[in-house]
Image: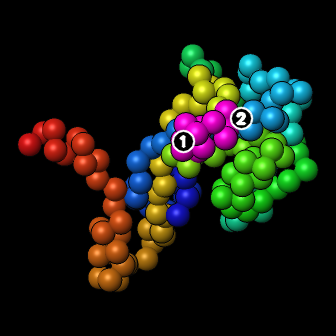
Amino acid sequence: MRLGEQVAKDMIAVRIGPDFRQAVVGTPAYFKPRGRPQTPHDLSEHTCIGLRLPASGGLYTWPFAKGGRELKVRVDGQFVFNTITMMLNMSLAGLGLAHVPEDLARIHIAEGRLVRVLSEWCSPISGYHLYYPSRRQPTPAFVLLVEAMRYRDRLRATSKS
């Protein structure tokens, strides 16, 4: 499973989740001495919490878009984790900025534990997809699994009824 629908050669991608937005967050105490970044380029002046991608071992670059302009920012910081939950926990501890799914940060933002920045730069990103090779004949059990996991936009389906 991966984010996005960029399909490698000889692979099939099946959407298993909706698009979602990311949020760049930090604690009020973190921002007090540093100020808040106004653009993604300002992140170079901040301590950012990185995410190591399990498949490649590389570091996740933070995607941003505004006014048709897209950019990916390589962030620096003392901490790099392989789970989003650890990134969020470190940000809640005041140790830097995290780039996490908006849904995970929403309650912390509402309760004032985290402050969201650069929201106008955080466009929706393509949701999770299941990838599998196209050159193999899938088993009936795998076909059932794919069909069960396939994302169906429930709002669109109910509004057409």
Q: Earlier in the sequence, mark 2 or mark 1?
A: 2
Mark 1 falls on what kind of element? helix
Identify the residue at horizontal 29%, vertical 67% (top origin).
Answer: 147
Q: Quadrant of the C terminus?
A: top left
Residue 152 among magenta residues: no
Three-letter code, disc 2:
Lys
Give the residue pinned by disc 2. Answer: 72
Is residue 106 left or right of 143 when viewed as pictured?
right
Three-letter code, disc 1:
Arg
On screen, residue 137 above or below 102: below
Identify the residue at horizontal 82%, vertical 56% (top origin).
Answer: 80
Q: Position of residue 124 (x, y in %)?
A: 50, 35
Q: Which region of the structure is painted magenta?
A: 105-115
Give the residue pinned by disc 1. Answer: 106
Is residue 58 left or right of 152 when viewed as pictured?
right
On screen, residue 104 above or below 1: above
Residue 110 among magenta residues: yes
Q: Position of residue 61 (x, y in %)?
A: 73, 43
Identify the residue at horizontal 58%, vertical 39% (top origin).
Answer: 111
Residue 106 seen by the camera: yes
Is 93 or 122 nearer to us in this picture? 93
Disc number for residue 51:
none
Mark 2 falls on what kind of element? strand
Residue 73 seen by the camera: no
